[in-house]
Image: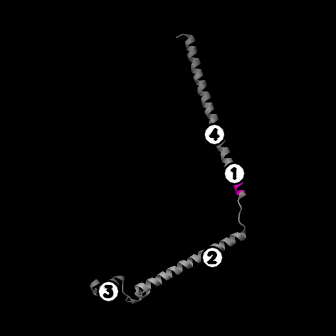
Amino acid sequence: MSDSTNKKNLDKIEDVKDAAAKKADSKKAAAKKNDKKKTNKISAFFKEYRSELKKISWPTFKEVVKNTCITLIVCLMVGVVIWLADWGLDTLRTLIIGGSDKNLASQASGNATPVEEAASDLGISSADVQ
């Protein structure tokens, strides 16, 4: 090969290297720009957050106490309504079925085990169970 061909090839190689270096530099610049954009977005978010917090109308202590009392009273009223419904339905069940759980428990023998009670319900003597 001649010197002029080698020189042309070397020039082409240098051009390719320069283009690659420029491309790498532009990527670095773009990355820095993106990092700057991200930083700007984060700082903008917190600035907006702070300004929104300033716009909030916080309740006074008197309003908080009033709203708390109202909440407690409503919870108590709902509890009483549920208790009355439970009591009424239990009474209705007792009238329909004829007896309550308390009466059934008192009718069971004093020291009988659950197995002995079940055996007596089935008509089996407790001696056969043991």
Element type at marker 2?
helix
Q: Tell me which corner region of the image, top left, top right, bottom left or bottom right, holds residue 115.
A: bottom left
Neighbor class of circle 4 (other Cα within 10 Å; few <14, some 14-19, many 20+) is few
Residue in the foreground of this view, choosing between 22 and 101: 101
Q: Residue at x 70, y 50 (%)?
A: 47
Q: What stretch is highlighted in magenta?
A: 49-54
In the picture of the structure, the residue carrying the numbered disc 3 is 120
Label located before the other in sequence (2 or 1) = 1
Label located before the other in sequence (4 or 2) = 4
Q: Which residue is drawn at 69% across and 72% down?
A: 66
Q: Residue at x 42, y 84 (%)?
A: 96
Whether residue 112 is situated above or below residue 28 in the rendered picture: below
In the picture of the structure, the residue carrying the numbered disc 1 is 48
Whether residue 32 is situated above or below residue 57 in the rendered picture: above
Residue 34: in magenta span: no
Drawn side of residue 98 relative to residue 69, left or right: left
Label located before the other in sequence (4 or 3) = 4
Element type at marker 1?
helix
* The disc label shown at residue 34, or none: 4
Question: Would residue 22 be seen by someone viewing this image from the given angle?
Answer: yes
- Label 2 – label 3 distance at C-alpha: 50 Å
Drawn side of residue 70 relative to residue 98, left or right: right
Neighbor class of circle 2 (other Cα within 10 Å; few <14, some 14-19, many 20+) is few
Question: Would residue 100 be seen by someone viewing this image from the given angle?
Answer: no
What type is the residue that disc 3 sits on?
Answer: Ser
Element type at marker 3?
helix
Residues at discs 1 and 4 in contact (Cβ within 8 Å): no
